[in-house]
Image: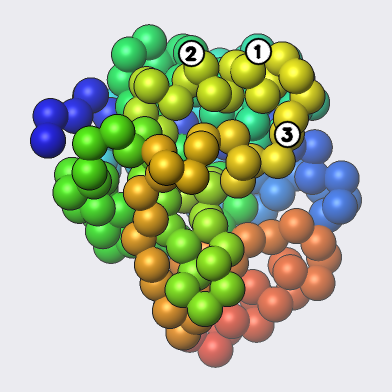
Amino acid sequence: MNSAPLAGAVLAGGLSSRLGHDKALLRLHDGGSADLLSRTYSLLRRVADPVFVVGGRREGYPCVPDLMPGRGPVGGIATALSHAAGCACLVLSCDLPFMTPGVLDHLLNGRARRPAGRHATLYRQAETGHSECLVAVYEPEALPHFLHCLENQLLKISRVVPPEEQHFIDYPAGDSLPFFNINYPADLEAARRIMSALGRE
């Protein structure tokens, strides 16, 4: 099916209050030379144009301030779609240290095969039904849903786009590592242990 052009949006507007410091600046890769923000931005640059960062000002990156600060991912995605002006948005949270190009390529292949009327393409964990709303493509037609929820303080991200407008790519629990995200100090320590075990440090 015909698709809108694709922009890329790094979601980096969170306060990282549970972690205690800015997760976007964590350096876990390549001997510590690349932080999570730069890595996420580079992943998106492979497949989307333009690419921008949603949230606070980040030196060296094209940044877009939140339409309504403090509204979490719903606000971030509403901002991204509004800024992209008719483009679809591949959104990616900045706190996914094990995300890979292959996962994004598979997502975009799924988007290309989505049925008509599906305005969000996202991964879903097969065993639990948990949807990965922050590794997803949202079409321009999803913007009204986000604006409605934003204006009405309906901030549960998985409920913004109606189920009948979502296209899911199922993955098994054994393939969940790319979706591991860092929210708490324990998550950060776990990520470091995993990277050490994988020989990435």
Q: Is residue 37 above or below residue 105?
A: above
**Which residue carries the number 3 mark?**
155
Mark carried by residue 39:
none
Task: State the residue in front, 71 or 195.
Answer: 71
Return the x and y of residue 5 as percentages of the image width and height: 23, 24
**Which residue carries the number 1 mark?**
67
Direction front: furthest residue:
164
> Which SS class for mark 1?
loop
**Which residue carries the number 2 mark?**
82
Q: Amino acid at mark 2?
A: Ser
Q: Amino acid at mark 1?
A: Leu
Residue 68 located left or right of residue 143: right
Q: Residue at x 65, y 36 (%)?
A: 73
Return the x and y of residue 180 as percentages of the image width and height: 58, 67
Q: Crowding near pointer 3: few (<14 within 10 Å), some, many (20+)?
A: some
* First in sequence: mark 3 vs mark 2: 2
Q: CA distance from mark 1 to mark 2?
A: 9 Å
